Amino acid sequence: QVQLMESGGGLVQPGGSLRLSCAASASVFNFNSMGWYRRAPGRERELIATVTLSGLIHYTDSDFVKDRFIVSRDDAKNTLYLQLNSLKPDDTAVYYCNARIASSEYWGQGTQVTVSS
């Protein structure tokens, strides 16, 4: 059973930054892909980006990601990161990590990000 553990969320002022982490219980090379998603209150879950086995990062075309969110992966630590910059109140959401192995899909418990002054 694969476990994903997100961390790094919290309360931040508009314009601030956070770095979220997703620690996997298995080597990232076991996963066909990993990804970051978010769910804001009253809204559907949104894709932020996916990372392939080889490390290629594909960001969603949605405007909310452009030039503000950066995904990276530390293979030695089996950890996926999401750097959130220039945060806005609309970025308030629970941020989730996802991993896929063949037809199986795994989710972390999520980490809350609240952007407020």
Image (cartoon, rainbow, N blue to C red):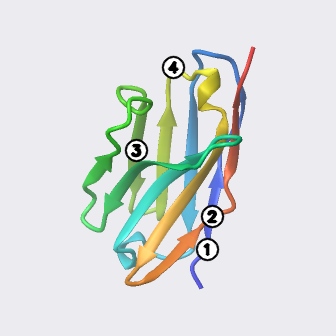
Please, what is the three-letter code of the amino acid marked with disc 3?
A: Val
Against 11, residue 72 (above or below) is below
Element carrying mark 3:
strand
**Residue identified by numbered label 4:** 86
Q: How far apart are marks 3 and 4 (CA)?
A: 15 Å
**The N terminus: image quadrant:** bottom right
Observer-nearest of 20 and 105: 105
Q: Distance between the residues labelled 3 and 2?
A: 16 Å
* Amino acid type of the residue tagged 2 in the rendering: Gly
Residue beneath the point at 37% across and 55% down = 50
Residue type highlighted by circle 4: Ser
Q: Name the residue under label 3.
A: 71
- Residue at position x 57%, y 15% in the image: 15
| Alpha-carbon span between mark 3 and mark 1 | 19 Å
Mark 1: amino acid: Gln
Q: Which residue is drawn at 49% across and 59% down?
A: 79
Secondary structure beneath label 1: loop
Q: Do the residues labelled 1 and 2 touch (CB within 8 Å)?
A: yes
Circle 2: element type: loop
The residue identified by callout 1 is 3
* Residue 54's disc number: none
* Side of 29 relative to 113 (left or right): left
Distance between mark 1 and mark 2 Cα atoms = 7 Å
Sooner in the amino-acid sequence: mark 3 or mark 1: 1
Relative to 92, is 36 above or below?
A: below
Answer with the quarter of the image where residue 17 lies: top right
The image shows a total of numbered marks equal to 4
Q: Earlier in the sequence, mark 3 or mark 2?
A: 3
Which residue in the protein does label 2 denote? 108
